[in-house]
Image (spheres, coloured by chain):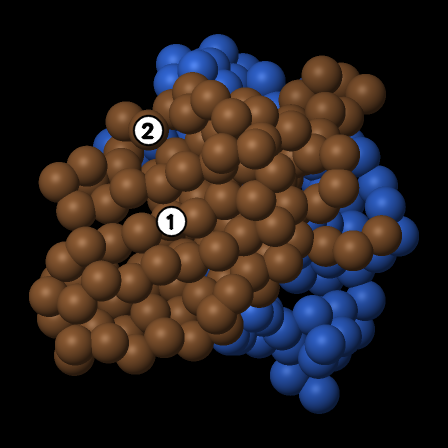
Chain colours: A blue, B brown
Amino acid sequence: QKEVEQNSGPLSVPEGAIASLNCTYSDRGSQSFFWYRQYSGKSPELIMFIYSNGDKEDGRFTAQLNKASQYVSLLIRDSQPSDSATYLCAVNSHNQGGKLIFGQGTELSVKP
Amino acid sequence: EAGVVQSPRYKIIEKKQPVAFWCNPISGHNTLYWYRQNLGQGPELLIRYENEEAVDDSQLPKDRFSAERLKGVDSTLKIQPAELGDSAVYLCASSSRTSGGSETQYFGPGTRLLVL
């Protein structure tokens, strides 16, 4: 089992729809969770981080964390073609001395 | 505020040749990371520095890879000799602590290495 798992996609949504990106993790002691966006040929760019169970909103983005289910998600409201990118989930691994473990990323395509 | 700076941006070498990558972190960030990212995968940590000290190099292939951060600021990652499987993007990141106590990492543009 991978430590951080994401569906590689591609996930295709129409412009204006809600895109839902999901991530599960295996280390129950993990405390910090991050979402990065990576455009093709570019480096990862931090979108949001979340520590506490529940929702955290920032503009069109909402991160959701459920530690009991070991699940973190990212919702993108009113998706735009410019949101088309790969979204990387990263988990701060308690078992590995706080190392940040990345999932393989989910490719999102927003169609005009 | 300037971001993480890396050079070169692209490098093409023949196998068995040496190669070096340079990174300048965000000013004031004491923690510096080197990652390798293969196509279609997330970044994988190679080494993490706290100031001059390498605190996690467990994933660094030490037979051919080396890194240094002599003055606790800039860092260099070297591969000697390079192998075909080393073709990847090498990312440098630096971090600061968030209010929650965790490290928020910011990435440089990366160096794309192609080994022929």
The percent coordinates of residue A91 (x first, y second) are 51, 31
**Disc nearest the viewer among 2 and 1:** 1
Q: Quadrant of residue A80?
A: bottom right
Q: Considering only order in the chain, which callout, 1 or 2, is on the residue closer to the N terminus?
A: 2
Give the Cα distance between marks 2 and 1. Answer: 12 Å
- What residue lies at 42% left-to-right and 58% top-to-bottom? B21
Mark 1 closeness class: few <14, some 14–19, many ≥20 residues within 10 Å: some
Query: Residue drawn 17% across and 47% down?
Result: B64
Asked if marks 2 and 1 fall on the same chain, the answer is yes
Residue at 65% x, 53% y is B4
Q: Where is A81 relative to B67, above or below? A: below
Place of residue B99 in the rendered image (x, y in percent of width and height, measured from the top left):
81, 21
Q: Chain of mark 2?
A: B
Q: Residue at x 24, y 45 (%)?
A: B65
Disc sitting over residue B97 in the figure: none
Res. A25 visible in picture: yes
> Which residue is most to the right?
A59
- Residue annotated with mark 2: B57
In the displayed structure, would residue A60 be above or below residue A73? below
In this figure, which residue is indicated by the disc labeled 1?
B77
Using residue B56 as the reference point, say whether residue B18 is left or right of it.
left
Helix, strand or loop at label 1? It is strand
Taking depth in this image into account, of A60 and A46 the one nearest to the observer is: A46
Residue type pointed to by label 2 = Asp
Q: Residue furthest front?
A: B71
Image position, residue A105 (x, y; %) = 46, 55
Q: Secondary structure at mark 2?
A: loop
The percent coordinates of residue B92 (x first, y second) are 51, 50
Dividing the picture into quadrants, the one containing residue B62 is: top left
Residue A19 as seen in the image, left or right of residue A109:
right
| Residue A89 visible to an observer of this rendering | no
